[in-house]
Image (cartoon, helix red, strand yellow):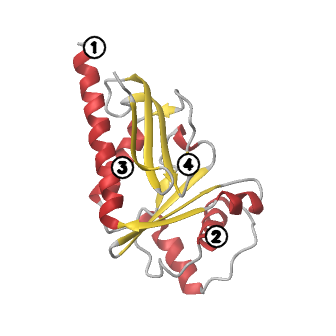
């Protein structure tokens, strides 16, 4: 049985997963890896036994349920670098050179980072133990993905940045296709082992 799934285009936006071992428990579902590709850069640990898959699957379903709710009012105007630096300074108190952002933008980011589920990754499991972070911002008929690594230095963070804007319908179609294929694999694994 094929256990690798790739939906989308790695050079723009894609989800890739691999399952080494399926598990009957829905909270775990399997052991493998879950990757997000944005602008040709990979987020996530590509190891056959990197994580339990349940958290990543649940997060994709949550994003589908909350379509259009991952918003910042200034989404198309903020620089990806500035947002990434502000986020790691806010969450991890990194002390990187703070970008010059209007105070109301900083307040909105801080207030909505979790309330509007702007953080797609990390998603609560070891899938992103490489320091990868992926932000999703819904902006009308577009979705903006900003991916970066919470690196040791600001320069490393900046060089890891990917900033991709895609049609909202396409973005959610990629998520939906991956979720459907993964669910089918997981369900079929129970049939084959029964």
Identify the residue under disc 3.
Answer: 60
Disc number at residue 97?
A: none
Disc 4 to disc 1, how far (Cα)? 32 Å
Identify the residue under disc 4.
Answer: 43
Is 57 positioned to the left or the right of 99 in the image?
Answer: left
What is the total number of numbered labels drawn onto the structure image?
4
**What's the residue at 50%, 40% (across, down)?**
125
Identify the residue under disc 2.
Answer: 81
Identify the residue under disc 1.
Answer: 193
Disc 2 to disc 4, how far (Cα)? 16 Å
**What's the residue at 54%, 32% (across, down)?**
50
Instruction: Assess whether mark 3 and mark 2 are in contact (beta carbons under 8 angstroms).
Output: no
Q: Is residue 39 above or below residue 123?
A: below
Disc 2 to disc 3, how far (Cα)? 25 Å
Disc 3 to disc 1, how far (Cα)? 26 Å
- On the image, the x and y values in percent for residue 128 come to 56, 44
Please report whichever mark, 4 or 1, sits nearer to the chain's N-terminal start: 4
């Amino acid at each position: 049985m094929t256990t690798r799934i790739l939906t989308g285009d790695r050079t723009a936006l894609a989800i890739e997963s691999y399952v080494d071992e399926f598990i009957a428990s829905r909270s775990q579902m399997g052991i493998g890896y879950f990757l997000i590709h944005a602008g040709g850069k990979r987020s996530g640990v590509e190891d056959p036994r990197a994580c339990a898959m349940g958290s990543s699957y649940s997060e994709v379903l949550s994003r589908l349920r909350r379509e259009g709710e991952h918003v910042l009012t200034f989404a198309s105007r903020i620089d990806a670098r500035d947002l990434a630096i502000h986020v790691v300074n806010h969450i991890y108190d990194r002390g990187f050179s703070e970008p010059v952002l209007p105070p109301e933008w900083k307040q909105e980011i801080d207030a909505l980072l979790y309330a509007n589920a702007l953080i797609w990754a990390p998603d609560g499991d070891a899938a992103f133990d490489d320091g990868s972070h992926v932000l999703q911002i819904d902006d009308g008929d577009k979705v903006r993905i900003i991916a970066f690594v919470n690196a040791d230095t600001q320069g490393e963070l900046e060089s890891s940045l990917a900033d991709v804007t895609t049609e909202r319908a396409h973005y959610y179609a990629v998520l939906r296709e991956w979720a459907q294929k993964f669910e089918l694999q997981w369900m079929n694994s129970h049939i084959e082992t029964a």
